[in-house]
Amino acid sequence: MRKHAERLLLAAVLALGLAWAGPQSAQATNRVTVTGEVIDTWCRVTAIMFAEGSAHYQCAVWCAIGGIPVSIMDEDENVYVILRVGEDDVSAANPTIARIQAHQVTVEGDLIERDGVNYLLVSRIADDQGIVNVTHEDVGIQPFGK
Amino acid sequence: MRHLLPIILALVLAHAQPAQAAKELGIDGEQPSQFEARAVDVLCELTGDCPQDCGGGTRQMGLLTDDGVLILVAKSSTLFAGGVLDLVAWCNRRVEVDGLMIDAEITRFYMVQRLREPGTEKWTRARAFSRDWARANKQKNANRWFRKDPAIRALIEEFGPVGIPGAKIPVE
């Protein structure tokens, strides 16, 4: 009787384990150094509005606090979606990441490529030059103005 | 990697049903797309670092299709807001979504516009951010939330609307 109960318990534990929906294994990472502009991923990639540099800073902050992924775009237009900075794994609506919107940065971290997207686990911001892409003088504040 | 995008997109869309109601935005590379998938915490899916509740709204969320394709959800139906709060309610469960697949060549992601329990009729609009923001900020609604949000106002006050303290703002 006791053996039967133990088998039932074992089966239940196995079933729960199989039902657990976590990933099968962690993906391979590549160590990288990325230099580029911190971007509002949605607006920049869709080009739904002007979304470069200082002109779009305000909107980029809105989107970052709104939980839209923040990325880095390098000079070859590779997009790296930031999932972690150091030990901080908050990648949605993180005010610390929002603070560097539109900045020109160099970061070191681990790159994971999956299904057409580059995901970046930033271990260190090696350089932050602030906003160097000064676009507001030509196009004003985009969108909606001040 | 870029040359694989059309293949990946084709795999996903092969299982997608024609969308009846996804609102098109006229974005290059957009495709209305309605399909079932599992809502996942992207960082968990990629690294095995898996808090039980998918991060409770603090981590980017994705959709994992039956073919094992991971789709980043970047946008919801709330203006200037992502889909994290819509998807986290479905953490590690199957959900049917309707929205726009954006294959922009340089990257790809999804805009979720509606969600529902697979096999049921009733859709929920992807506006969890608006609901939660209004509740958290004790407002009747989230109209122009981006002009009122305390965290945003603090950043704009500190750095100015163009991110450069003291910068001259052109008259519009």
Image (cartoon, helix red, strand yellow):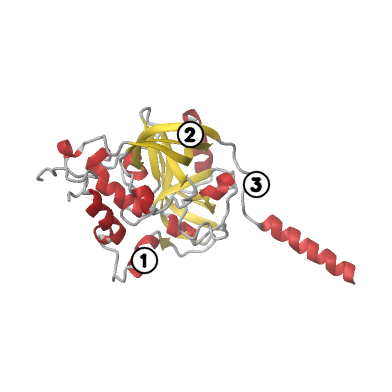
Using the image as rendered, state which of residue A76 and residue A30 is in the foreground: A30
Using the image as rendered, state which of residue B151 and residue A112 is in the foreground: B151
Q: Which residue is mark 1?
A: B131
Kind of element beneath mark 1: helix
**Quarter of the image where the N terminus of chain A is located:** bottom right
Left or right: residue A6 compared with residue A102 = right
Pointer 2 and pointer 1 on the same chain? yes
Q: Which residue is mark 3?
A: A24
User: Mark 3, chain letter?
Assistant: A
Q: Is residue A15 visible?
A: yes
Using the image as rendered, state which of residue B75 and residue B57 is in the foreground: B57
User: Mark 1, chain letter?
Assistant: B
Q: Nearer the viewer, mark 2 or mark 1?
A: 1
Kind of element beneath mark 2: helix
- Mark 2 and mark 1 lie on one chain; the one further toward the N terminus is 2
From this view, report whether residue A10 is shown above or below residue A45.
Answer: below
Residue A74 in the image, given as x and y percentages of width and height: 38, 31
Label 2 is placed on what type of residue? Leu
Assess whether mark 1 and mark 3 are in contact (beta carbons under 8 angstroms): no
Residue B149 in the image, given as x and y percentages of width and height: 29, 60
* Residue B166: assigned label: none
Question: Residue at point 53% right, 45% down?
Answer: B15
Label 1 is placed on what type of residue? Arg
Q: Which residue is mark 2?
A: B5
From this view, report whether residue B169 is shown above or below residue B136.
Answer: above
> CA gap, disc 3 to disc 1?
34 Å
> CA gap, disc 3 to disc 2?
23 Å
Using the image as rendered, state which of residue B119 and residue B58 is in the foreground: B58
